[in-house]
Image (tube, grey):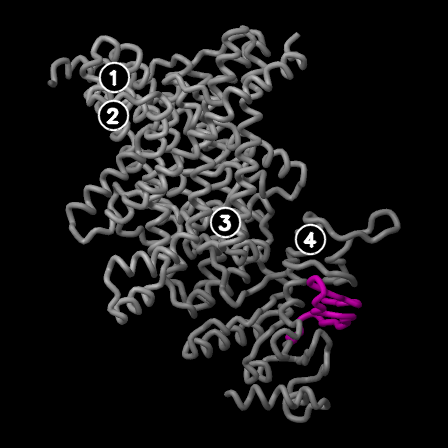
Amino acid sequence: MIWDWDYFWEALPIVVGDGLWITFQVTLLGSIVAYLLGMVLALLRRSRIRVVSTVTWAFIEFIRSTPLLVQLFFLFFVFPDFGLKFGPVTTGVIALGLHYSTYAAEVYRAGIEAVPVGQWEAATALSLPRARTWRAVILPQAIPRVLPALGNYTISMVKETPLLLTIGVTDIAGAAFQEASSTYRYVEPITIAGLLFLVLSYSASLLVRWLERRVGTLH
Amino acid sequence: MIRFEDVAKRFGDHVVLDGLNFTVAPGEFVTLIGPSGSGKTTILRLLMTLEQVTSGTIHVDGECLTHVRRGDRLVPADEKHQQQVRKRIGMVFQQFNLFPNMKVLQNLTEAPIRSLGLSRAEAEARAHELLDLVGLSDKVHAHPTQLSGGQQQRVAIARALAMRPDVLLLDEVTSALDPELVAGVLRLLKDIAETTEITFLCVTHEMGFARDVSDRVLMFDHGHIVEDASPDKLFSEPDHERTREFLSAVLERG
Amino acid sequence: MFDNLSLFVSTISRGLLLTVEATVGGILIATVLSFVFGLAMLSRSRTVRLVARIYVEIWRGTSEVVQLLWIYFVLPVLIGYRIVPLVAGIVVLGLNFGAYGAEIVRGAVQSVPKAQYEGAIALNLTPAQRMRRVILPQALVEMVPPFNNLFIQLLKGSALLTMITVHEMTYQAREVLIDRNIDQAWLIWTLVLLFYLVLAILITIGMRLLERWAARLVGRKPDERSIFSRRKKPVLAETVSAGGGPL
């Protein structure tokens, strides 16, 4: 018997119960890190100090061009050298957040550039201080419009959380794999994991599409 | 040569053409005039099979373009049938629609080779001849993007002629050109019209040209033919008030 | 501090060939699938469109890790024998990124102006001729920059093959080097990252050359960007589907 529905229904609550919450938690925290750090990177990238903007650019390109998995291993093995004793979940959140912050930075950059030049000029004409211009004029216009694009990256992040099983985090895929390894029955648990991701990313994409309609997109 | 029977075309609720009937004789040069949105361009696009009729039939040289007979019923024509009838028809577009991924020569040889089955040598000989005719023999190996609008439109005319069409559709061919380039293109078209047997259906805002070359002029408004007359009659003493209004508006503008 | 540097470099290099094989193999399959399913999504037949849409949504909507686990652990149960890990990895990379690539092809074909179709119809070219001779060559120029990004994602995705015991670069570092040289972990992982960076730069150079060639094909002047720079996609104007995504 290749496919066993009884086992399917037995394994489903185990995979969901053990994994879903971790996947959710990691994605949520990872996104928060990515969105905040991405904003910092975007602003540094626009710095008037040449060295700062160039170094930021190089950092973003480097992180974007190399595998998240290797970055994850880097943090996992190198943190302890600095006396940082993070658990696997925390390390995973930092790795995901760092990796996706470079994508978020690009999104913010595009959002900021889409704010018409006239807005900067009007702020200058009103003698608003630079910090105030950013906080009160530019960002409030840029941020709503970048939300759908950021949401898309969160969807991607959901599907990359299984990487964390390599450092011992049991997300959906990790839980499925654990269940499969303990019973030596791989078909149902891993198929369940696939189905769950399909449901998650599809419903998340509906959410982002709704968001897109709410705020309108930039072209 | 061309026969429209009860042709209607609707886009959703918007009626573009309604109950349209007219014929064009072989070798005739017929110009369609009228305000924009009156359905002139749609007529050309229906003939070129770029749009499909909502109802009614179109015949070209006795052959039905829009429908085929299946059993005792008429059903909308499929791609294969349309290809068969379309062979006789060529079209020159407002925006030239040259292929930017091909040099001038290949723009002219591509369809004769692929569609008519000419050999490369035959197709190239024909292309050189036509480029000579339109005065662009020195642009054989240029890219369309390197040509002026007037030159692009001449290439487009040559490209259409390379298919040896029986019918040539001209869709506002000078509307996208700089004013100083218009006269040259119109002179070329007049030459072609006078020296060949091709049947022309032309949509234009160049009233001087229309009067000069047309055998017949059809005045359109809201998808209907308001007036169908010889150019001399229509331009100097039109029967209809609507035609008079339109002509005075156009001529006033210059 | 840099003791063992040459050992590290040579050990990682032993995985380089497999990383390159997996990436190139993945790119070849992904490219073919991109065109097949990208064009299928534009088919007149509703059934063909539906099949293509299902392929794209399934492979974009599930995770690459799960796909690898599935082909490595589940498929052997279903078909009765185990696939060579490298082959399994290449197939997953190809199928996964082909689904993203299909959207690229579809978008690029749709971006060719309608006037070009009409020009081709007026010359009585058949639908196949229109696509092959007129539309695709023009769409190609639009496809190259997003495919550049896609191929770099694919290169990055090849590191995951370590999970199904393909002995590529990440595997060499993780399984061969780390345990005996844990105190030099930072150096090992930095080297691995640099290897990937170099490969990513090579992909970009290749794609820039391809882009210049494609631009010349349609008589456009290649733009003046350096050969090393990737064009960023317009991040705000993308369409959302279950894929989401950094592509």
N-terminal of the two: label 1 or label 3? 1
The answer for which chain carries disc 1 is C
Q: Where is residue A119 in the image (x, y as percent from the top left)?
A: 33, 65
Q: Residue B82 carries which label?
A: 4
For the residue carrying disc 3, how many other residues have a C-alpha within 10 Å: few (<14), some (14-19), or many (20+)? Answer: many
Query: Residues at badges 4 and 3 in contact (C-beta under 8 Å)?
Result: no
Query: Residues at badges 1 and 2 in contact (C-beta under 8 Å)?
Result: yes
Depth-wise, is mark 3 or mark 2 nearer the camera? Answer: 2
The residue indicated by pointer 1 is: C12
* Camera-side residue of A17 and C181: A17
* Camera-side residue of B168 and C109: C109
Q: Where is residue B131 in the image (x, y as percent from the top left)?
A: 44, 63
State the CA–CA distance, disc 1 to disc 4. 62 Å
Give the extent of the magenta segment.
B1-30
Is there any visible trace of residue B128 in the rendered image?
A: yes
State the CA–CA distance, disc 4 to disc 3. 20 Å
For the residue carrying disc 2, how many other residues have a C-alpha within 10 Å: few (<14), some (14-19), or many (20+)? Answer: some
The residue indicated by pointer 2 is: C195
State the CA–CA distance, disc 1 to disc 3. 46 Å
Q: Is residue B93 left or right of residue B236?
A: left
Q: Is mark 2 on a helix, strand or loop?
A: helix
Q: What residue type is labelled 1?
A: Ile
Q: Is residue C6 left or right of residue B229?
A: left
The answer for which chain carries disc 4 is B
Q: Which mark is residue B83?
A: none
Depth-wise, is mark 1 or mark 3 nearer the camera? Answer: 1
Give me the residue at 35% from left, 24% from top.
A69
The residue indicated by pointer 3 is: C134
